[in-house]
Image (cartoon, grey):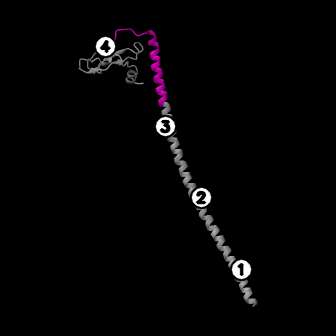
Amino acid sequence: MTNENLNKLCMDESDPMLNALVRCKHGILLNLQTSWSKLNPGRRFWSCPCYGSKNCKFFRWRDKEKVDPRSSLILPRLVNKINELEQELCIRQVHIDNLRNSNLLLERRLNRRLKWCRFNRKILLCILICVVAMFIEFKYIIWISILFCVVAMFISNQ
């Protein structure tokens, strides 16, 4: 979880200091942030975005109070757990995406095979129709030949 998301998560909407106008020497309006370090977990502060560079040393804690010892143990663990869960979520999302891609490939392969099977079925049906037609033609030719023979025998007997 990014620090910005953690900051939003820990915002106390009723905190009057959220609306405090705090500016650094550059005149930049600063947002109240939350520390997630092991020494100051959950502690609120303002700092210039240029802190550490451009010779800006503006940093101010929202309060002077010390962090509760229990919080200094629990909050870093919770933040680490959130980070672990987010990493696990990313890994599972990648796995899901891979499964979707392989599923699409399998569906395409199946569709190609189904088209091939339909094509083969049509060819087999055409062959069957041709064979049946040939058999029917042949049968009629035999019957016609027999009929001609019978007629010829009948005519020759008269």
Crowd around label 4: few <14 · some 14–19 · many ≥20 (10 Å)? some
For disc 3, the marked residue is 97
Query: What type is the residue that disc 4 sits on?
Result: Arg
For disc 4, the marked residue is 60
> Does dot 3 land on a helix, a strand or a loop?
helix
Crowd around label 2: few <14 · some 14–19 · many ≥20 (10 Å)? few
Residue at screen point 49% across, 28% down: 88
Quadrant where the image shows the C terminus: bottom right
The label number, if any, that marks residue 146 in the structure image = 1
> How far apart in space, not on screen, are marks 4 and 3 (Cα)?
44 Å
Nearer-N-terminus badge (2/4) = 4
Query: What type is the residue that disc 1 sits on?
Result: Ile
> How far apart in space, not on screen, are marks 1 and 3 (Cα)?
73 Å
Residue at screen point 58% across, 55% down: 117
> How far apart in space, not on screen, are marks 2 and 4 (Cα)?
80 Å
Region of the chain picked out in magenta, as a range: 63-90
Nearer-N-terminus badge (1/3) = 3
List x then y, in percent, for residue 154.
74, 87
Q: Is residue 36 left or right of residue 130?
A: left
List x then y, in percent, for residue 36.
40, 17
The label number, if any, that marks residue 121 in the structure image = 2
> How far apart in space, not on screen, are marks 1 and 4 (Cα)?
116 Å
Residue 45 falls within the magenta-colored stretch: no
Residue at screen point 51% across, 34% down: 95
Q: Nearer the viewer, residue 4 or 92?
A: 4
Q: Identify whether 12 is placed above or below 123.
A: above
> How far apart in space, not on screen, are marks 1 and 2 (Cα)?
37 Å
- Classified by dominant secondary structure, the portion drawn in magenta counts as helix
Nearer-N-terminus badge (4/3) = 4
